[in-house]
Image (cartoon, coloured by chain):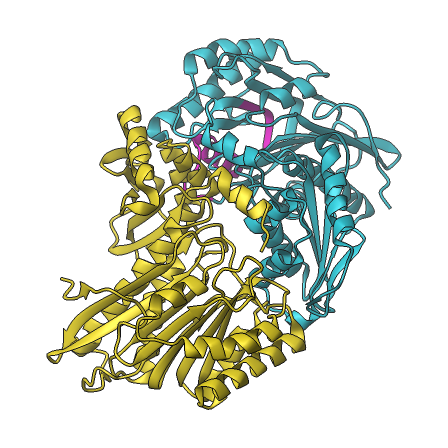
Chain colours: A cyan, B yellow
């Protein structure tokens, strides 16, 4: 079905994009902390932002910017300070950042978008940023995607990047993406930082629609701890450098192909985030079916993926279908408990709302095996839940809850 | 303001109630596992039950029973097996339990309510129950409240009980209560087991209204881990044995006095549950003000109390106002972030949406001091949040998230 293939690289794989990541001295640790993604030409830009009432200055800045002009040339992202809850001073810092970068790139500040991640309430270290901006511009390269992916990390253990290629009208079209996640990941909106580049030509409303739908099926379906951040956003640039005809008809084969590939990029990145959840030892995939519509199925899936009791049980390698059933039941979706079916991998745990006898030791071993590989493999704990005979389907991803989640978040320092 | 005082005892403090708790062999551990509360006369009965789609047989049984007849004589509660997700067999077990108890007490089974707590998907050990029922009836005593409180415990570290007395029309009126909580506590409904007795005479709709409102301000405002159980319920009996005139007018001074005392009983018990949350080292009280109405304030308070990041920070003794602000922002209540004020105990952390400089070491020491006493004292970590100048107010209670939460829930056995 998928007529794309994975290629190396990430946000710089599509034509006409350069990127960089450097250490600007924003993080006390000395790790890379300033990332830049630049399109050679003005790119159609779609964005999805946190729904929180408490938002970082950069989020308000991007929303305002994109309302005025739905295209851009560059995304600047710092890690270390979130620039959230910083009031008017933080807002001025955002404006200053865009001005400095505009001068360094020789483009209008109106073509620049901003993102920040790090400690809430801390203003960006502007002196370090002022020095860092010319350096990150100097470091820009068509191979710089991975460096950018590293520079946006905070408590992430690994950087997250992907690039896919397909053919539209006989020409290669590519989408690349990087993201960062770990703690504060939850299905409410973007819930992390994600930057996506694409060299297709596509109309503005179509590109925004594609991104919104892809985010609903990916980043909004992952949960690490139920906390939504002040800074969450997904920004996607499409610069048309593949020289295909502009895609404007949502019903066209090209549009559907592009959206499917965009969704795959988002789902891949979302799963990377869930797998790398703070303290996680395994990735859980929750597939829900039998609801009236997809939205209801996604809601149940998210609730199960976010349940502390389910997550603790999986960490304990306990095939605890009771906690899965309880989480499904409180998701706010009406169903008949006599219809409930639950399986874990190949083990059917529950049918017609009642537990089945199953080989508990083998089911527990399944959990041990899936967890063993954890980050290095594609192993996934698969939980399938059916709640009726409706045609609705939805998937969510999450991770288990371990001692390390508590350690990381109780002893957090920058 | 409060014109009541605390007295010794719990559900057997009000006139005309007896109770008992025994070991019937339902729990493998040999701990007490069968509780019974009996009113000498038919008592007006109010109930609030879990909103989950996956419910224990006893919940459906009680709801059906109370629809038919809003009064009862007895509540039987077993711990060890939840009798949830047990289908038709579990339903028959519920009917059988009521029949056995009806015979032993010589009352109609229609006057009996049932509750269960324990492992989901396990049917009650009916052979042990059949033997246990005459024993628990034999053990009934006017001093049996505390034994009943012990027999409903599962992972609770301590039993939870209270009794208050006031005067109405010159006669003493008492309300007693017991509850059990620990894991699976969340603001969605009753979210635990609570049994309340009262010797006032009160009309059925008034008593139900009082209980619903009291639960909204107490049990529904506590959270341990965000999981709602299949078995949650609060049942309140009022048997009129105080021989006061029946309270029927909600505007009367007597009604308001009774409701205030009922609310106090519920809040006291709810706080006991939050303080005894699995792995908790301290009780957090979140006071929110400045919203349009109380409901909005309660919603924000619950969201903060339930945030894994806030809970982890408190466990780490970190006065992390950023996580508190982020949780407030995603509660689904509109406010202006420039209005946000946050304080921790006497430390003002944030004003006008921006962090204030405060003595971080002293604020951290405040958290250390509050936690030290934990269960033994009334020490509470107080977080106050104001989001505007509305008149809405609300409080929620929760506990911190510790390594022990994970240990208890990952290594859970009955």
**B399 to the left or right of B91:** left
**B162 to the left or right of A124:** left
Up/down of A134 relative to A18, above or below: above
Up/down of B392 relative to B46, above or below: above
Location of the N terminus of chain B (image quadrant): bottom left
- Report x, y in % for residue B72: 40, 84
Query: Foreground residue, A70 or B31?
Result: B31
- Report x, y in % for residue A234: 59, 36
Seen at 49% across and 60% down, the residue is B31
- Displayed quadrant of residue B122: bottom right
- Displayed quadrant of residue B11: bottom left
Location of the C terminus of chain B (image quadrant): bottom right
- Report x, y in % for residue A132: 52, 11
- Displayed quadrant of residue A349: bottom right
- Report x, y in % for residue A187: 57, 46
Residue B199 within the segment the image draws in magenta: no
Query: Foreground residue, B193 or A50?
Result: B193
Q: Is residue B333 visible in this depiction of the protein?
A: no
**A324 to the left or right of A257:** left
Q: Is residue B162 visible in this depiction of the protein?
A: yes
Given the current orientation, which residue lies at the most extreme right position? A170
Query: Foreground residue, B89 or A209?
Result: B89
Seen at 63% across and 44% down, the residue is A316
Query: Foreground residue, A41 or A153?
Result: A153
Boundaries of the magenta span: A52-77
* Count of numbered tags: 0
Up/down of B20 relative to B239, above or below: above
């Amino acid at each position: 079905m998928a007529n794309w293939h994975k290629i190396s690289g990430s946000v710089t794989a599509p034509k006409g994009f350069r990127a960089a990541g450097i250490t600007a001295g924003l993080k006390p640790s000395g790790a890379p902390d300033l990332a830049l993604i630049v399109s050679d030409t003005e790119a159609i830009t779609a964005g999805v932002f946190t729904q929180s009432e408490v938002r970082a200055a950069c989020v308000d800045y991007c929303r305002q910017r994109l309302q005025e002009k739905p295209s851009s040339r560059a995304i600047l992202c710092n890690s270390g300070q979130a620039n959230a809850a910083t009031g008017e001073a933080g807002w001025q810092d955002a404006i200053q950042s865009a001005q400095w970068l505009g001068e360094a790139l020789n483009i209008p500040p109106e073509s620049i978008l901003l993102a920040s991640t790090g400690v809430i309430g801390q203003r960006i270290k502007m002196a370090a940023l002022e020095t860092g901006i010319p350096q990150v511009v100097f470091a820009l390269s068509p191979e710089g995607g991975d460096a950018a992916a590293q520079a946006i990390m905070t408590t992430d253990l690994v950087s997250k990047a992907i690039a896919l290629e397909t053919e539209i009208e006989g020409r290669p079209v590519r989408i690349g993406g990087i993201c960062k996640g770990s703690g504060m990941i939850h299905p409410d909106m973007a819930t992390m930082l994600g930057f996506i580049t694409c060299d297709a030509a596509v109309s503005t409303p179509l590109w925004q629609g594609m991104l919104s739908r892809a985010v609903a099926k990916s980043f909004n379906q992952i949960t690490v701890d139920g906390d939504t951040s002040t800074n969450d956003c997904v920004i996607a640039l499409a610069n048309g450098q593949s020289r295909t005809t502009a895609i404007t008809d949502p019903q066209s084969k090209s549009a559907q192909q592009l959206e499917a590939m965009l969704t795959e990029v988002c789902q891949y990145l979302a799963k990377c985030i869930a797998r790398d959840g703070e303290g996680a030892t395994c990735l859980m995939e929750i597939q829900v079916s039998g609801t009236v519509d997809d939205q209801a199925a996604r809601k149940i899936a998210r609730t199960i993926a976010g349940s502390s009791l389910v997550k603790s049980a999986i960490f304990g390698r306990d095939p605890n279908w009771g906690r899965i059933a309880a989480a499904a039941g409180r998701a706010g979706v009406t169903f008949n408990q006599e219809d409930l079916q639950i399986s874990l991998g190949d083990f059917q745990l529950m049918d017609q709302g009642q537990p089945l006898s199953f080989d508990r030791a083998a089911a527990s071993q399944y959990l041990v095996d899936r967890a063993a590989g954890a980050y290095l493999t594609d192993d996934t704990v698969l939980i399938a839940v059916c709640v009726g005979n409706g045609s609705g389907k939805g998937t969510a991803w999450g991770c288990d809850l371990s001692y390390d989640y508590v350690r990381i978040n109780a002893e957090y320092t920058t």
